[in-house]
Image (tube, grey):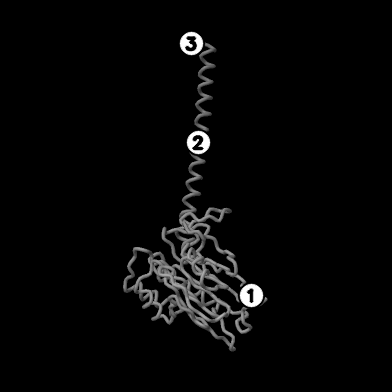
């Protein structure tokens, strides 16, 4: 026959066991919820965040912008990085761009990933994509660090003018133009110019901006390459997969406004807190 002390000991052991099981159960629940949240973020980043682009709009105000260019829309895209996007993805991006009705359309490099060789089918897809984009004044491109000899062929077949360390004087409506300057940041050279028009500089790697503005005047500089870090840490605006010096969306450098587009493609098959982007710049005098 059990003594009272033995019964009390059994009861205590039972209570301890039940409390331990409850703690283990709570721990399993917490871990399960944590894993579900992480998995949900990963699934979102891979299948939604990496695919659906957004438009980031900026107002560019300067008294140096000619009257004829007041209200003009400059649209920038960058870093397609085939094979991170497919034909369907590019078709959706094309619709979003054409809805804006760009006046000037610019592409700031990297059609493909670094070690990826474009297939004939991918070249055809890219040419169809670029041919389907509309603009009223012109379409221009600069080469990226991952691009090869196929870049100029694709862009020229798509009626884009490649600016390889050269300037382009753009007229619209009257005789007061602006200047478009395209820099090859993999083989950078200064551009000799005598004109003092309002200037827009196109470059791929934003870290080359200091070299450019040391010898050329840029009122507005548009770059790409960073992909916004692909995965951004919330509230800190820090990109995980990026080591650029200039890695935020905007910098003011002396007389130059530098904007960095987050790109359309990706290198790591994920975008989190950092959607693929199309940049819209509205030029205004006031």
Where is residue 61 shown, x and y percent of the image? 64, 73
Q: CA distance from mark 3 to mark 2?
A: 35 Å
Residue 42 tag number: none
Ranked by sequence position, the earlier of labels 3 and 2 is: 3
Q: Is residue 96 visible?
A: no
Q: CA distance from mark 3 to mark 1?
A: 97 Å
Relative vertical location of residue 146 with respect to residue 44 in this rendering, above or below: below
Q: Secondary structure at mark 2?
A: helix
| Proximity of marks 3 and 1: CB atoms separated by less than 8 Å | no
Ranked by sequence position, the earlier of labels 2 and 1 is: 2
Residue at numbered disc 1: 62
Q: Secondary structure at mark 3?
A: loop
Where is residue 36 shown, x and y percent of the image? 48, 48
Residue at numbered disc 2: 25
Q: Quadrant of residue 171?
A: bottom right
Where is residue 63 shown, x and y percent of the image? 65, 77
Relative vertical location of residue 8 with respect to residue 207 in this rendering, above or below: above
Report the front residue among 265 and 58.
58
Instruction: Characterize the local packing of mark 3: few (<14), some (14-19) or many (20 or more) Cα atoms within 10 angstroms.
Output: few
Residue at numbered disc 3: 1
Q: Quadrant of residue 84?
A: bottom left
Ranked by sequence position, the earlier of labels 3 and 1 is: 3
Q: Is residue 279 visible?
A: yes
Q: Farthest residue to the bottom: give it.
A: 174
Q: Farthest residue to the right: give it.
A: 286
Looking at the image, which residue is at 48% across and 43% down? Answer: 32
């Amino acid at each position: 026959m059990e003594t009272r002390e033995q019964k009390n000991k059994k009861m205590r052991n039972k209570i301890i066991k039940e409390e331990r099981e409850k703690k283990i159960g709570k721990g399993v629940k917490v871990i399960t919820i944590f894993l579900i949240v992480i998995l949900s973020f990963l699934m979102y980043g891979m299948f939604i965040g990496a695919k659906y682009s957004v438009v980031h709009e900026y107002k560019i105000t300067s008294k140096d912008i000619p009257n004829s260019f007041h209200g003009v829309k400059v649209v920038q895209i960058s870093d397609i990085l085939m094979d991170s996007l497919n034909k369907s993805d590019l078709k959706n991006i094309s619709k979003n761009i054409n809805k804006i009705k760009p006046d000037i359309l610019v592409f700031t490099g990297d059609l493909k990933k670094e070690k990826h060789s474009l297939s004939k089918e991918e070249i055809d897809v890219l040419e169809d994509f670029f041919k389907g984009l509309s603009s009223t004044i012109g379409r221009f491109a600069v080469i990226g660090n991952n691009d090869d000899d196929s870049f100029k062929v694709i862009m020229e077949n798509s009626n884009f003018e490649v600016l390889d360390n050269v300037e382009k004087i753009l007229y619209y409506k009257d005789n007061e133009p602006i200047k478009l300057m395209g820099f090859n940041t993999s083989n950078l050279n200064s551009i000799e110019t005598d004109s003092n028009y309002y200037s827009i500089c196109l470059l791929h790697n934003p870290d080359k901006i200091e070299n450019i503005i040391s010898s050329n005047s840029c009122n507005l500089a548009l770059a790409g390459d960073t992909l916004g870090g692909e995965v951004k840490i919330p509230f800190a605006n820090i990109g995980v997969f990026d080591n650029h010096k200039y890695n935020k969306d905007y910098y003011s450098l002396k007389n130059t406004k530098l904007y960095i587009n987050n790109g359309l493609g990706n290198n790591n098959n994920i975008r989190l807190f950092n959607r693929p982007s199309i940049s819209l710049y509205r030029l205004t005098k006031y």
